[in-house]
Structures are given as structure tokens and as C-alpha cells.
């Protein structure tokens, strides 16, 4: 869901944020920007059908890989990123310079150990970090797609990833792992291509987007669309950015990624750079300053239309509906080994939703493990240092390695002084 | 079947947690190597791990405590958090060759339903429970007039999870009523030695635990 922006407890810094890189992003189609990493053009022969009935192709997928693919091509792990994540999960972000969004999970001595796994992460279809999305040029018009980009779904994102995996010549992924929207993609992968996946790890996710979650997304979209600089989606043509709308959308969403406890621990009712309230509408409280920073820094690394399209993709996700209303039918006779994980304080994708997935898997006798990790950090916990979560995932992956003769992994303690997720406020 | 479950590969990688409790070993001896096993109330997964590595079974677990579940999964076992009283209904008929319920029946809300689920989900069920007819329990109640505390029943009455205690004789009656056939019947004594049940009077008095291999009578 998030990445760089959720990390810094920024109450100790001014609310304003620079827009140094926004020019590099806005208006520049993916092909013209110089992003590190690989790009591949897919669906070149024939366009890829989308769930909406439209077709798309050829299109570009931007991705990063970490580690080495073994000779048998049996050690590939696909990581699916969340709403505003991207392929830069284990290296500094090329736009913000911040640590990768899953550096605590991916790397030597981490659960997704790059000394034993070949870890792939691709920017989703509709994204804004190199994979084709609304900010790119529509070949039919020579103008940016903008609001005419076809609506994509989680299924479409996964179909595009499958083309990438085909392109890489990987017959079967050792594992598909992802949290939040990434977890939706994991479920979709397992349901759609069970023969291509050995292990599936859906984290902090659900088999459908709830009414409450759709509601929060709609607030965010309305904030963007109400910003006059959105220009009915054509802001790129006028060189504008719907900054205020995007900031409000991000602020709202950000609250849903935390928990009341986490907010209280981080900020309480403490004031920002002042001894007493201003009796005005400045950011008196640290929590306000923090949210304003989250909002404004988000604008610099994300595209407004991408945000609309990707939130929509999540809203439309309902895996049971794709299988005649019976979730279990998505997994019937599945050979995939599942490890479903949730966090106690996550109210956006609560444990009850994880249990629905587990019940469906059980009812078709699928191989499933289910772990609920104790954390007070809310939905964002899956991005943070949570030793129990990391240990359990490592154990699960080791169990799967055992069957394949792949090497076992041992977690090494994280250097806490370089903890990219360290809470700088408390 | 997933290639991950290949018994040959499991066997090749065997080599841990070989010494398990004697009563668990007796359960393991009732299970055919290479079969599909669900361990209900699997705790930290000791039995499951043993069965997978030394009997080459395809193993799954159901455990109430999240601590137990997390310990199992971080050992590479396929275990979910769940409640025998509520969640067994989710499993389809005949999914497993064996369903194991070790020292858990007496802690369920509805032992009869749980038992019926065991022999529905599994071709066979392996069930063990503390025998409330064991002579030390009878003696404690008779002489001290207090709820007994033994190795099998270590908690005082007010905090025990054991809400449906029974004797071996009681258990056989329930099996009869529930259409459950008994293929093997053992008692486990205080010395952890197993003894086939011959005389009911003797078994019900001297067996600290009962251990049974069950199946549905109509199969």
C-alpha cells in the first residue's frame, strides 16, 4: 500500500515538501524517463484482453530483479507490490532517494533471501513507474492516455505479470508474495495459474474489497477529481498537478494504514514546534504536520490518474465473484501451498477477512497455513520490522524449500541502527 | 498433490525431533506411512513433524492457540489457527486417511459432534484422552473428596480447559451411539506402556489414558 511515505515519523520536520522530482515525472511518459531497472514490451504480437472487455497492447512492464536465477529456474519469487508501491523494493527509490519499501524483507539474511532466491518485482499495469499507465502516450492519439486509459483490474495486473514470467522463461514460480493489494494479486495468481505457483503468501489482504474500503477509496478519488488542477484528468496537457487533491487522498488513506494505538504512540496530542495552540488552522498538532508531509511528498512520486485507476482495480476485486460466488471454487484441486498472514491491529484488512480465505481453502482441502501476528502498527505492519512475522514467513519458505531441495535460510538480525522503518518520532 | 509433499523428498530430508513423548509415539504407530494426516489440536507440532519426517505422511494441523500455530508454521508445517468445535465442519468428507485428536476431546464443547466430524473427514480417526475412571482419580475423589489433579489432568477444576471428562467405558458408549466402530483399543499406563484393552473393568481402572483407532461403522 505504501512505501517510503509511511516510514519517517516526520513530526520533527516542516510540513512543506519539495517537488524537485515532480517535473521528472509529470508529463514524461515512462519510455522517456531514465529509471533504473529493466523494461520489457509485452503483448506485442496480439493485444492482451482486459476484464473490462477492452484490449491493451503492446505495453511496457518495468521490473527489478534481485539475486540470481538458478540453473533449474526453481528459485524465482515474485513480489506483488501494494497500491502506491513499485518495483524498487530493495534499493533506494530513484525519485525519493528513500530506502526500498521492503528492504526489511528482501536481501541477504532476510526471509526473501537474495542469496538463495531470485526475487522479481514489477510495477503494476496502470502504475506510474515505468509500466504502462495513464500518464503514458496513447499510440492512437499521440497524447497521454489520461482519463481514456482502459480500466484495469487485479486480474489484468496478474495477466501482465504472467506475460513477464513467461518472458523470463520461468515455468513455475517458487513463490508469489505480497501484502495488501499485493496479496490480492497473490490470490489471483494462485487461482488463475495454480500450475505456475508452488507457494502463495497473501499478507494483510482479503479476497474482495469491502464496502468500507471502497468508501475510503472513493473519498480519495473525489478529493483528486474535485481539485480544479485535475482538469478532468487532462492535467498533463496543461502541465498542472492536482496537488491538493492528491495530498488529501493520501492523508485519508494514510490514516487507514495505521492504528489508533500507533497514532497515539507516535504523536499523542503533542504540539508541533510550539508550546501552545495557535487558535487557528495551522498544523498545531504533530499528527497534522505528519499527515500534511505524507500528503505533499506523495504528490512528488505518484501520478494522480494512476492513483484513480489502481484504487479502482482494488475496488473491483472480488475473487469469489469470478468463480460463481463461491470463493472455494477459486482454489478447487489447487496444488499451491498457501500461507495466509494477518496482523491483529489491521482494521483495513482484518484477520476476519484472512480467515474467510482460510475457510475457503480448507473446504477444498488445500494445503494452507494461517498465521495472525501480534502487532499494534495497523495495516502497515507488513512493511515494518515485525520479528514474529519475518520468522514465520522464513519458516514457511524453508518448509517449501525442503521439498524442492533448495537451501534453507537463516534470518540474520537486522542492523537496527540502519532500520529504514525506524520510527523517528518516539 | 503438490511436489512439495513428495514423500520421497520428505524422507530424504528427515532428521529432526526424533524423540517424542511416548504417548505420541503410540499414536504414530497407528498411522500408515505415506498417508494423509490431519492433527487436530496439534500444539507446537511435535507429532506432526515426527509423522512427516519419519512416517512420510502429508500432514496438516489445526490448533487453537496462535502461539502454537506460529511455532508450527515457522517450523515449516502447514497449520492453521482454528477451533475443533467450529472449524472441522469446513473440511470435506474423506479428505484425510487419519485425523488425530490427542488429549483434546475432553476440552471440546461438543465431543459427540467433534468425534463424528473426525470419522467423516478421515477414513480413520486416532483419539486419545485422559481416562477419568483411572484408579488414582477414583481414589483421590473417594479419599480426599476433591477434584483430582494428575499428570494427565494437571489443572485445578476452576481453570482446567477440560470440560467434558469421561471414562473409557463412557467413551465406548458414545462410539456405539454415534455409529463409530473401534478398530483398535489401548490403554496407556502411568509408565507410558500401552496395553490392548481386554477386560473392560481392568482397562477402565488401570489405564491412565485411552487410545483408540476409529472409523465409521457404516464404512
Image (cartoon, rainbow, N blue to C red):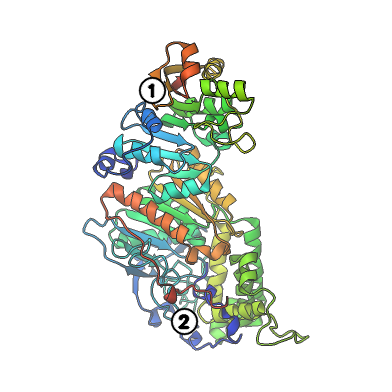
* Residue nearer the viewer, A352 or B85: B85
Q: Can residue A203 be seen from the camera position used here?
A: yes
SS for tag 1? strand
Q: Which mark is residue A43?
A: none
Q: Residue furthest left?
A: A71
Vertical placement of residue A227 versus A77, above or below: below
Task: Name the residue: 55% across, 24% down.
Answer: B137
Q: CA distance from mark 2 to mark 1?
A: 68 Å
Q: Can residue A50 be seen from the camera position used here?
A: no
Q: Residue furthest front?
A: B143
* Residue nearer the viewer, B105 or B151: B151
Name the quadrant containing residue A254. bottom right
User: In the rendered image, which residue does mark 1 sit on?
Assistant: B194
SS for tag 2? loop
Vertical placement of residue A350 versus A219, above or below: above
Task: Name the residue: 56% across, 76% down.
Answer: A304
Task: Name the residue: 45% across, 10% down.
Answer: B199
Q: Is residue B76 left or right of residue A328?
A: left
Q: Is residue A147 left or right of residue B210?
A: right
Name the quadrant containing residue B22. top left
The quarter of the rendered structure image containing the C terminus of chain A is: bottom right
Say if mark 2 contacts mark 1, CB within 8 Å.
no
Can you give x and y, in whole percent of width and height, for residue A268 in the image?
67, 73
Q: Nearer the viewer, mark 2 or mark 1?
A: 1
* Residue nearer the viewer, A143 or B97: B97
Can you give x and y, in whole percent of width and height, for residue A425 in the image?
57, 78
Can you give x and y, in whole percent of width and height, for residue A300 in the image?
52, 82
Badge 2 sits on which subunit?
A
Can you give x and y, in whole percent of width and height, for residue A181 in the image?
51, 61
Q: Which mark is residue A96?
A: 2
Amino acid at each position: 500500500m505504501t512505501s517510503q511515505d509511511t516510514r519517517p515519523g516526520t513530526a520533527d520536520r516542516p510540513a512543506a515538501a519539495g517537488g524537485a522530482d515532480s517535473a521528472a515525472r509529470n508529463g514524461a511518459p515512462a519510455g522517456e524517463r531514465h529509471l533504473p531497472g529493466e523494461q520489457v514490451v509485452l503483448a506485442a504480437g496480439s493485444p492482451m484482453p482486459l476484464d473490462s472487455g477492452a484490449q491493451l497492447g503492446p505495453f511496457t512492464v518495468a521490473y527489478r530483479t534481485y539475486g540470481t536465477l538458478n540453473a533449474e529456474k526453481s528459485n524465482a519469487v515474485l513480489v506483488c507490490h501494494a497500491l502506491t508501491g513499485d518495483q524498487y523494493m530493495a534499493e533506494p527509490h530513484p525519485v525519493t532517494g528513500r530506502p526500498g519499501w521492503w528492504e526489511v524483507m528482501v536481501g541477504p539474511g532476510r526471509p526473501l533471501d537474495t542469496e538463495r532466491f531470485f526475487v522479481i518485482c514489477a510495477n503494476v499495469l496502470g502504475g506510474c513507474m515505468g509500466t504502462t499507465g495513464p500518464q503514458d502516450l496513447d499510440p492512437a492519439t499521440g497524447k497521454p492516455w489520461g482519463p481514456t486509459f482502459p480500466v484495469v483490474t487485479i486480474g489484468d495486473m496478474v495477466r501482465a505479470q504472467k506475460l513477464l514470467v513467461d518472458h523470463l522463461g520461468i515455468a513455475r514460480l517458487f513463490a508469489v508474495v505480497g501484502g495488501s493489494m499485493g496479496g490480492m494479486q497473490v490470490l489471483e495468481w494462485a487461482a488463475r495459474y495454480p500450475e505456475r505457483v508452488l507457494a502463495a503468501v497473501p499478507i494483510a489482504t482479503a479476497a474482495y474489497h469491502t464496502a468500507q474500503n471502497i468508501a475510503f477509496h472513493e473519498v480519495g478519488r473525489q478529493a483528486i477529481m474535485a481539485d480544479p488542477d485535475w482538469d478532468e484528468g487532462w492535467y498533463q496537457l496543461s502541465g498542472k498537478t492536482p496537488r491538493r487533491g492528491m495530498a488529501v487522498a493520501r492523508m485519508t488513506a494514510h490514516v487507514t494504514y495505521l492504528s489508533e494505538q500507533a497514532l497515539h504512540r507516535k504523536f499523542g496530542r503533542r504540539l508541533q514546534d510550539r508550546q501552545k495552540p495557535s487558535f487557528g488552522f495551522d498544523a498545531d498538532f504533530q499528527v497534522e504536520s505528519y499527515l500534511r508531509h505524507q500528503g505533499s511528498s506523495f504528490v512528488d512520486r505518484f501520478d494522480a490518474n494512476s492513483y484513480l485507476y489502481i484504487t479502482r482495480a482494488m475496488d473491483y476485486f472480488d475473487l469469489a465473484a469470478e468463480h460463481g460466488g463461491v470463493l472455494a471454487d477459486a482454489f478447487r484441486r489447487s496444488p499451491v501451498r498457501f500461507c495466509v498472514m494477518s496482523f491483529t491491529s489491521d482494521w483495513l484488512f482484518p484477520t476476519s477477512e484472512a480467515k474467510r480465505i482460510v475457510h475457503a481453502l480448507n473446504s477444498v482441502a488445500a494445503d494452507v497455513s494461517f498465521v495472525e501476528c501480534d502487532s499494534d502498527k495497523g495495516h502497515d505492519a507488513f512493511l515494518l520490522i515485525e520479528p514474529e512475522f519475518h520468522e514465520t514467513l522464513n519458516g514457511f519458505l524453508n518448509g517449501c524449500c525442503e521439498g524442492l531441495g533448495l537451501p534453507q535460510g537463516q534470518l540474520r538480525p537486522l542492523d537496527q541502527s540502519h532500520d529504514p522503518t525506524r520510527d523517528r518520532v518516539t | 498433490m503438490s511436489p512439495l509433499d513428495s514423500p520421497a523428498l520428505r524422507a530424504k530430508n528427515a532428521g529432526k525431533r526424533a524423540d517424542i513423548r511416548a504417548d505420541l509415539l503410540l499414536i504414530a504407530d497407528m498411522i500408515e506411512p505415506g498417508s494423509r494426516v490431519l492433527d487436530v489440536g496439534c500444539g507446537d507440532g511435535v507429532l506432526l513433524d515426527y509423522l512427516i519426517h519419519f512416517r512420510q505422511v502429508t500432514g496438516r494441523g489445526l490448533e487453537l492457540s496462535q502461539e502454537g500455530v506460529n511455532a508450527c508454521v515457522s517450523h515449516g508445517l502447514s497449520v492453521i489457527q482454528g477451533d475443533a468445535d467450529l472449524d472441522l465442519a469446513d473440511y470435506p468428507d474423506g479428505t484425510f486417511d487419519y485425523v488425530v485428536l490427542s488429549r483434546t476431546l475432553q476440552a471440546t464443547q461438543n465431543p459427540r459432534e467433534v468425534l463424528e466430524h473426525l470419522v467423516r473427514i478421515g477414513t480413520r480417526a486416532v483419539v486419545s484422552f485422559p481416562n477419568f475412571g483411572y484408579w488414582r482419580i477414583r481414589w483421590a475423589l473417594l479419599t480426599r473428596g476433591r477434584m483430582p489433579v494428575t499428570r494427565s489432568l494437571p489443572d485445578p477444576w476452576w481453570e482446567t480447559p477440560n470440560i467434558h471428562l469421561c471414562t473409557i467405558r463412557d467413551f465406548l458408549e458414545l462410539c456405539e451411539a454415534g455409529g463409530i466402530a473401534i478398530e483398535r483399543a489401548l490403554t496407556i499406563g502411568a509408565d507410558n506402556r500401552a496395553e490392548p484393552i481386554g477386560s473392560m473393568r481392568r482397562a477402565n481402572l488401570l489405564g491412565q489414558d485411552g487410545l483408540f483407532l476409529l472409523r465409521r461403522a457404516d464404512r
